[in-house]
Amino acid sequence: MGRPQIEELEKLNLNLYEAVIVASQHARRLNARRLQQLEQMEEDPSIDIDSRKITAVALRDVLDGKVKFKRSDSM
């Protein structure tokens, strides 16, 4: 899983501004999930936590189409 490149966003015809907003929202969700896992880890040390950077994971998820979003025409 390489580092996401801007050219990849352009190939998918994604607006860079929208892609960054969607990725940041997804990163917040991923971070909240990671914080929950850290709290649970105190009780169950066998929980495995992903050590990759959340922002890179979020951008990769957007590029891979794992994050669905609806475009708003009100902008």
Image (cartoon, rainbow, N blue to C red):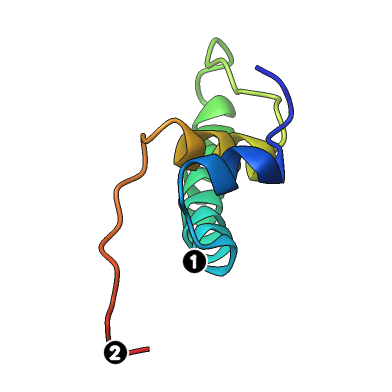
**Residue 55: where, in percent of width, then height?**
66, 45
**Residue 63: where, in percent of width, then height?**
50, 37
Type of amino acid at the residue the image marks with label 2: Ser
Q: Earlier along the polypeptide chain: callout 2 or callout 1?
A: 1
Please state which of residues 35 and 3 is positioned toward the viewer in this rendering.
3
Q: Quadrant of the C terminus?
A: bottom left
Residue displayed at 53% across by 66% down: 21
What residue sits right under mark 2 in the picture? 74
Q: Secondary structure at mark 1?
A: helix
What residue sits right under mark 1 in the picture? 18
Image height check: is 11 above or below 23?
A: above
Residue displayed at 50% across by 44% down: 30
Q: In the image, 9: left or right of 3? A: left
Residue displayed at 53% across by 56% down: 28
Name the outermost residue toward the top.
Answer: 46
Image height check: is 34 above or below 72?
A: above
Q: In the image, 41: left or right of 74? A: right
Image height check: is 40 above or below 59?
A: above
Q: Residues within 10 Å of mark 1 (few under 14, many from 20)?
A: few
Type of amino acid at the residue the image marks with label 1: Glu
Q: Secondary structure at mark 2?
A: loop
Q: Residues within 10 Å of mark 2 (few under 14, many from 20)?
A: few
Residue displayed at 55% across by 50% down: 27
Please state which of residues 39 and 49 is positioned toward the viewer in this rendering.
49
Choose top left, top right, bottom left or bottom right for residue 50: top right
User: Real-space Cα distance between discs 2 and 1?
Assistant: 13 Å
Image height check: is 74 above or below 24?
A: below
